[in-house]
Amino acid sequence: EAGVTQFPSHSVIEKGQTVTLRCDPISGHDNLYWYRRVMGKEIKFLLHFVKESKQDESGMPNNRFLAERTGGTYSTLKVQPAELEDSGVYFCASSLTIQETQYFGPGTRLLVL
Amino acid sequence: EDKVVQSPLSLVVHEGDTVTLNCSYEVTNFRSLLWYKQEKKAPTFLFMLTSSGIEKKSGRLSSILDKKELFSILNITATQTGDSAVYLCAVPLRAGSYQLTFGKGTKLSVIP
């Protein structure tokens, strides 16, 4: 069974540009989560989808971040326009049901210059 | 405020040593505590603990939860260089959403 995959693995962009990150959850997992780790800090929750619906987006830092999960399969996280403080590792995780273990992808390392 | 605190932040040991990693938490509506191992990329799941005093074991790794004192420990016996990683402790928060709150992690380095 394939695990959670994320694309790209690394992205370097300039301040003000737009970046879109993609996450493909484990097949059949209705729950999809986005997290972020900025340097020196702990991994922090961004938002949670159940199928195509946003269950909880309380962790989204501001309106420059837009997450979608059309069709309830893969998800994208767009940052527009990117700022220096958006640099970090963006992780995606999925779980079969809300109570079950979340399995993480390898992360996308974003660097905003 | 809900929080998860891990200690130590960093640890260097020699192969064969036994290590104990600590995780304390302060959360409302506690349901479970999870341990993950992060080597280069994806955090990989190790244990989920829900009941106090029941040890979970996987090979040389074991973990136990104390819900009265609000902490968990992760033990690794006879460490190997392949155990070198960041070990993350996480607790799901809030009813209706299982967002995980993580500690900063313990970076374990095992040297030959």
Image (spheres, rainbow, N blue to C red):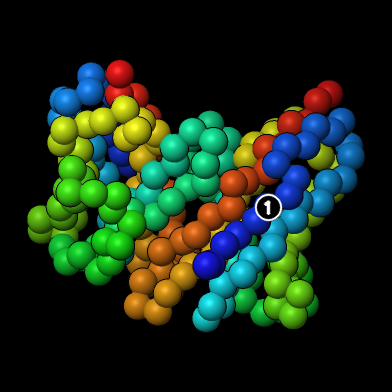
Instruction: Pick out the residue farthest to the left.
Output: A70
> Which image quarter is the C terminus of chain B in?
top right
Image x and y of residue B76, in percent: 79, 49
Q: Residue at x 28, y 53 (%)?
A: A60
Q: Residue at x 23, y 40 (%)?
A: A22
Comparing A35 with B1, the one in front is B1
In the rendered image of this protein, does residue B35 appear above or below residue A86? Answer: below
Image x and y of residue B51, in percent: 67, 79
Find disc 1 in the rendering and name its residue: B6
Q: Residue at x 73, y 49 (%)?
A: B7
Q: Chain of mark 1?
A: B
**Visible residue check, residue B58:** no
From the viewer's perspective, tell me whether residue B56 is left or right of residue B95. Answer: right
From the viewer's perspective, tell me whether residue A87 is left or right of residue B60. Answer: left
Identify the image quadrant of residue A15: top left
Image x and y of residue A57, in percent: 26, 61
Rate crowding at label 1 as few (under 14), some (14 to 19) or many (20 or more) other CA atoms within 10 Å. many
Identify the image quadrant of residue A110: top left
**Visible residue check, residue A91:** yes
Q: Amino acid at mark 1?
A: Gln
